[in-house]
Amino acid sequence: MKRLLFLIIVSAALWSGYWFYGASTTRSAFEGWFADRRADGWAADYDTLEVLGFPNRFDVTLTDIALADPATGWAWDAPFFQILALSYKPHHVIAAWPDLQHVATPLDKFVITQAAMQASVVLWPSTDLAPDRVRLVADTLQISASDGTATAMSALRLAAERLGPDGQPATAAPEDVATGYRIALSAEGVAPDLGLRHRIDPANRLPRTLDALRADVTLGFDRPWDRRAVEKARPQPRLISLRLAEARWGELELKAAGDLDVNPEGRATGRITVKAQNWREILAMARASGELPAGVADTLERALSLLAGRNDGIDIPLDFRGGLIWIGPVPVMDSPVFVLR
């Protein structure tokens, strides 16, 4: 019994030492990361940093956190942010966001509120912190832009996993080469901004929320997503393989699938086929909203009329080439440039 008691005491002391060493190392890593970002010219601040969870967890909580990269125009701040991990499984973490956060992009500023937002992230065990699998869930989400427009949804679900060279879930360490990720996204109860809805549907024929909004896509990047994607530069897309994207709103329905290759300048080549039900109403609503310029809408209507005749449903092949999107022999609009800042 004395030997057993001695063994228990020694084991507890060793484990306690491991936890306090791990907690100290974790704190130092976060402090060093923020100091490095400030040295790079970022605004990178927080009020308090705590590492709790003894004896089986490393629970990191930062309060009044604010990050801004002036080189790219991205910024984020929140009253707190938490990263939770088991001390014996530190590469599997849970991230938890508050019910209010602010995000600034090169295009606009947004206020995001939600009842709950959490992500489960499984990292490849290395200092690069490259995610292998991600699962994110947000409930009762609202995104408000600086002009006062707001989009709400009852739930957002996102799942992503890193792929190996064979297109299957990766089992080897990520290398600094082209890397693919399969991403599934589903948004439930999406309610577009009321002002936008009144512009495109003044007769209120459509329901308040979309019936479906989801996508299943594989994205290929020129290198893996890891800590350098935040610290230095974003990986750039090189492949977009859309298995299915679907949006249904009342009697209006859009489905899309296809593949695009993206060159280093962000220009895409390939074809996306869109299946549209009640396409004339969809086009009329896009024109009324102001999101689709009248000249582009006119060109689209002429091209689609040739394909559809009098049919309400239509399969639209969108060919990306030469910096333009084509429907058959007709160029209808400029192609987006797929570059991440």
Image (tube, rainbow, N blue to C red):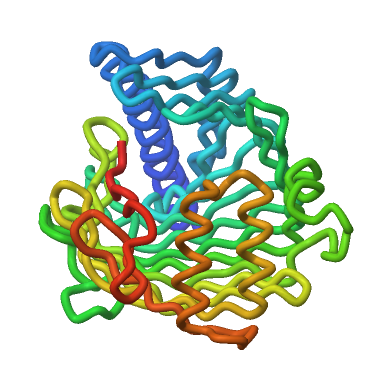
Horizontal and vertical percent position of residue 107? 46, 30
**Front position in the image: 193 or 8:** 193
Location of residue 321 by image quarter: bottom left
Number of callouts in the render?
0
Asked if residue 156 shows in the view, the reply is: yes
Residue at 44% across, 71% down = 303
Decide if residue 40 is on the left or right side of residue 90: left
Q: Is residue 152 visible?
A: no
Quarter occupied by the C terminus: top left
325 on left or right of 113 = left
Left-right relation of 315 to 32: right
Q: Is residue 212 above or below residue 79?
A: below
Image coordinates for residue 155, horizontal then vertical, percent: 71, 58
Residue sitting nearer the eye, 223 or 109: 109
Indicate the quadrant where residue 25 lies.
top left
Q: Is residue 96 above or below residue 222?
A: above
Q: Residue at x 53, y 61 (%)?
A: 158
